[in-house]
Amino acid sequence: MTDIESRTALITGASRGLGLALARKLAERGWALVLNARGETDLEAARAELAEETRVVAIPGDVADAEHRRALAKAARTFGGLDALVNNASILGPSPQPGLLDYPLDVLEEVYRTNAVAPLALAQAVRDELKPGARILNVTSDAAAEPYKNWGGYGSSKAALEQLSNILAAENPELRVYRVDPGDMRTRMHQEAFPDEDISDRPLPEESVPGLVELLTGDLPSGRYEARALTRANEGAR
Ligand SMILES: NC(=O)c1ccc[n+]([C@@H]2O[C@H](COP(=O)([O-])OP(=O)(O)OC[C@H]3O[C@@H](n4cnc5c(N)ncnc54)[C@H](OP(=O)(O)O)[C@@H]3O)[C@@H](O)[C@H]2O)c1
């Protein structure tokens, strides 16, 4: 791990929600940032805001697109390599989510491509840019393990991401590979998941950020973590 002033993270899906909240916190701590999202307007707004604080490049595109991943890897190289790859971008699939027997298979393939294949593909694309001690942080979900009705598409994509992360960690002991459940958060994805519900009681993504920062800057071994439990453990230790 390099000095904090020269650390760089690539965060996918950083135009809103958890990705933007993490980008803001890392910018505050002096990290340089390579960011992406599909929507150009929101991404440019995020870039302009963060550029007040740190060195940032934002490249609009879809994580499922190989050409776009190459562009992100090239930007990481320009920044002198990565201390962290944060695979945060994800899609829910249909809203409301259908049961598995009714799940449109073309959409299921898109959900898998985005949520499971793309994070591994991006790790492959940036493998030569990862600095010694770099961390790969893959954002998963409790839906990866719990049999919630109608969560079969998104949940199984996150289950695949969990096990890809688990095995990537076993194969690459020189890296830290984390899979982390951020918990329920008041974001666009959460509203899509519960289209008829008032989600104003859910915690903001900012509450999950300290746990992610602990993984990116602390000394925890590769493995599965719950972001807000890490925050509570840290508060208890103080
Ligand atoms: N919210 C929750 O309650 C909750 C719970 C457990 C886990 N999570 C996980 O937490 C992470 C963040 O979710 P969130 O709630 O912050 O979601 P969000 O508010 O919907 O934000 C998702 C971000 O990812 C980008 N994105 C989506 N698909 C993309 C693609 N194919 N290529 C590039 N960028 C893409 C979005 O921008 P564009 O749409 O413009 O591309 C946006 O910046 C996800 O991995 C999610 O599965 C969320």
Image (cartoon, rainbow, N blue to C red):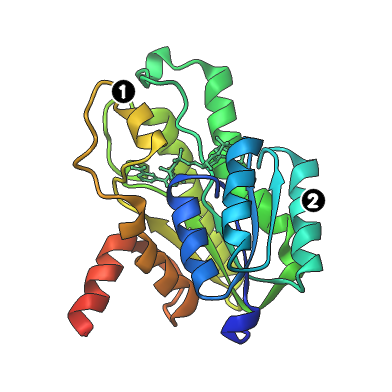
- Position of residue 50 relative to residue 43, above or below, is below
Considering the numbered disc 1 on the image, is that residue within a helix, a strand or a loop? loop
- Which class describes the residues within 10 Å of circle 1: few (<14), some (14-19), or many (20+)? some
For marks 2 and 1, the one nearer the N-term is 2
The x and y percentages for residue 133 are 60, 80
Foreground residue among 184 and 201: 201
Tell me residue 44's x, y (percent).
64, 45
Instruction: Name the spot of residue 174 as percent of width and height, x first.
Output: 61, 78
Seen from the viewer's position, the closer of residues 135 and 112 is: 135
> As shown in the figure, which amino acid type bears the numbered disc 2?
Ala
Quick one: quadrant of the C terminus?
bottom left
- Out of 182 and 199, give the one closest to the viewer: 199
Look at mark 2 in the image and give the residue it sits on: 71
Q: Amino acid at mark 1?
A: Pro
Question: In percent of the image, x 50 and y 34: which residue is there?
Answer: 91
The answer as to whether callout 1 falls within 8 Å of ligand 1 is: no
Q: Which residue is mark 1?
A: 195
Q: Are marks 2 and 1 in contact (CB under 8 Å)?
A: no
- Residue 139 in sight from this viewpoint: no
- Gap in Å between the C-alphas at discs 2 and 1? 35 Å
Q: Residue at x 67, y 67 (%)?
A: 55
Q: Is residue 25 above or below residue 156?
A: below
Q: Which mark is residue 228?
A: none
